[in-house]
Amino acid sequence: SRVVIRAERAPGEKRVAATPESVRKLRGSGLEVRVETGAGRHAGIPDASYLAAGADVEARSALTAGDVFVHVRPLSVEEVRALPGGVLTVGTADPFQHPDVVKASAVTGVTAFALDLLPRISRAQSMDVLSSQALIAGYRCALIAADAFERMFPMTMTAAGTLAPARVLVLGAGVAGLQAIATAKRLGGVVSAYDVRSSSAEEVRSVGGTFLTLDLESADAGGGYARELGEERSQRQRELLTPHVEAADIIITTAAVPGRAAPRLITSAMMTGMRAGSVVVDLAAESGGNVEASVPGERVPFAVDGGTVTVIGIRDVHSELAVDASKLLAMNVANFVAVLTVNGSIDPDFSDELVSGSCLTRGGAIVHPRLADLLA
Ligand code: NAD
């Protein structure tokens, strides 16, 4: 069987889902590998390196049934319609945001796998694109915040006086949030963090943050995920967070609920009491926004007493660290493809929960239970 790695086409997308190392791993499973010309150019991987690792490199090649077509960004409806039936697609699908693509995959007879739906059991950790990419994003958010802040992070005592440390507040302490905490801490900030899952308190402490306990019931949905709060509890959460928001120099928000728009944690009203010069970075800007005032891909000055707070809406953050993001992503993909492979051939075992839990469409139908309502 053959695995075909596409060159990403979305403007600004620099990642690629294969590295020489992942090509070697795929070849080691007995698979042929084809990489589209120039696929790694923005991630520091020349075509020659793929060739040296045992891949073919070709301009957009014709696919045939049984090929595995690997993508980073979700495919478009047009791309799916152009695929021959019987192709398997593997990549991030974001199916709740792109239901039309899921429907097109079913109609085209494509077997589509969404790595972002893999059940988060321990066997899936090496394939977990959400974790690998969230780690990259969380780290980057802390650097973006530090860069926009016109003060130092560490407490600094000199003969000329003392500089106070930056007070950093991280909201949402999943994979991205924990990495933001660890990075802000390494920069010398005094970091506190909050998550609606009280089970994350231990993890926050382990990376050097102080966990904020609010007088609010934990909303743990199991498997590391949060439940969506009802409107009344969201309102209460915002009230309880307001004094912490006002006390922070830096806020980094990373809260998410699977399959839902990002929860609104900070309204503009809550920000009016912040100090001028503070910085807010919203990692969830593209998925609905944890921060009301954020705009994806933009730095918005928010007026407060005596100046502004800089509100940064994150967009395409992984491409700012395309080399490492690609490195992790490529191994996630190779590890997943290995699960689909038996004796050098792609032969998915649908009784394996990793396979059934990530499969969106198969045999002309939408088969994922969480997408059942799309069938209607
Ligand atoms: P995520 O991206 O879905 O959400 C980010 C964070 O936002 C979560 O911690 C969530 O609790 C939090 N959040 C949601 N609503 C909130 C609100 N209203 N206020 C404050 N915070 C809110 O989550 P994630 O980072 O992908 O994963 C979360 C956790 O899952 C991780 O910390 C990890 O412990 C666990 N996990 C386990 C595995 C595994 O066992 N294989 C793999 C990955 C992650």
Image (cartoon, rainbow, N blue to C red):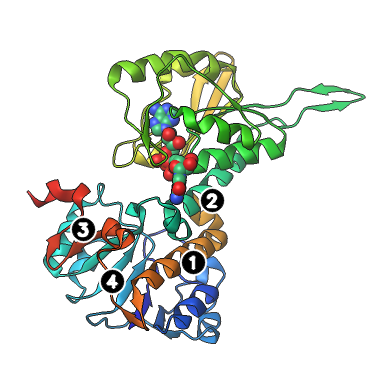
Question: Ligand 1 shows up in which quadrant of the image?
Answer: top left
Contact? badges 4 and 1 (CB < 8 Å):
no
Name the residue tied to disc 3: 101
Measure the C-alpha gap from mark 1 to mark 2. 15 Å
Q: Earlier in the sequence, mark 4 or mark 2?
A: 2
What residue is disc 1 on?
331
Q: Is residue 293 visible?
A: no
The mark that comes first in sequence, 3 or 2, is: 3
Left or right, 5 with reference to 274? left
Tell me the residue that label 4 is attached to.
348
Question: Given this view, does label 3 or label 4 mark the residue nearer the observer?
Answer: 4
User: SS at mark 3?
Assistant: helix
SS for dot 4:
loop
Looking at the rendered structure, which numbered label has been put on residue 361? none
- Within 10 Å of disc 3 (Cα), the crowding (few <14, some 14-19, many 20+) is many
- The residue tagged with tag 2: helix, strand or loop? helix
Looking at the image, the residue that sits furthest to the left is 376
How far apart in space, not on screen, are marks 3 and 4 (Cα)? 22 Å
Ligand 1 has an atom within 8 Å of the beta carbon of the residue at disc 1: no
Give the mark, 3 or 4, whose residue is nearer the N terminus.
3
**Disc 4 + disc 2, Cβ < 8 Å:** no
Q: Is residue 154 visible?
A: yes
In contact (CB < 8 Å): disc 1 and disc 2: no
